[in-house]
Each structure stands twice: as C-alpha cells, then as structure tokens.
Amino acid sequence: MTATPVMHLPVISECAAESCAYNHGHTCHAVAITVGDASTPVCDTFLDADMEGGEPSVTGRVGACKMADCRHNTGLECHAPSITVGYEREQVDCLTYARA
C-alpha cells in the first residue's frame, strides 16, 4: 500500500476580522477555513460572535477554496504559501485572492 501525499494547507498569516469568534489578536484559530461562495472570495468560516472559537494552539489554514478563477487555486484547493483575511467592501474576504 502506498501512502497518499499530504497537501500543505496554506497558513492564514493575518486576519483583520476582529469580530470573528476564531480571531484572537489578528490570528485565526480555526483549524481550517473555507474560502469563497463561487462568486466572491468571502471567508465562509467567518462567525461574528462574542464567544471564542477555534483551537488556541493552532494557527488557521485554508482547508478549501471555491474560487476556481484564482491563480492560487488548483482543483478547488489553495496553493498560495499563505493568505491574509480582511475586509473588502464590508465583507470578510481572502485578500490574497488574485484572478487568474
């Protein structure tokens, strides 16, 4: 039996969405986020809540990306070395998104 190669999940280097339950000190602590709703690079994992979420010992990573037209996207997986999440037109987006 051969081992399946493990894909490197890009780290979220910074998150400016301070009201997100997973954000503590501009660091995302969701184990993995999903980006995109097929038309905009929104952070689908964003949760505006007073409670703290995520795993404090983990820096968030990109688990899936629905933005097939992004130059960092292959097979709906992000291949950027890291991403930044923040506000774009009053919604929380992947700011690393770049149309191919």
Image: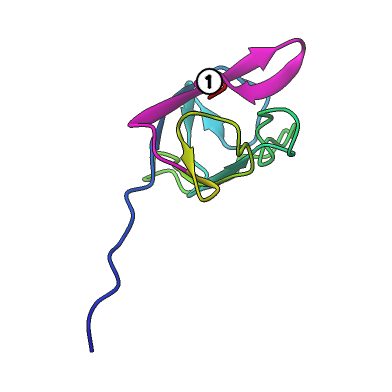
Q: Which residue is mark 1?
A: 98
| Relative image position of residue 71 (x, y in whole percent) | 48, 28
Residue at far top of view: 89
Residue at far left of view: 2
| Relative image position of residue 25 (x, y in whole percent) | 47, 22
Q: Is residue 25 left or right of residue 45?
A: left
- Verify whether residue 95 appears in magenta: yes
Q: Which residues are magenta?
A: 78-96
Q: Quick one: 60 or 70, which is closer to the camera?
A: 70
**Which residue is depicted at the point 37% across and 29% down?**
82
- Verify whether residue 94 appears in magenta: yes
Q: Amino acid at mark 1?
A: Ala
| Relative image position of residue 28 (x, y in whole percent) | 49, 33
For residue 43, above or below residue 54: above
| Relative image position of residue 74 (x, y in whole percent) | 47, 44
Q: Is residue 10 left or right of residue 25?
A: left
| Helix, strand or loop for the magenta stretch, by majority | strand
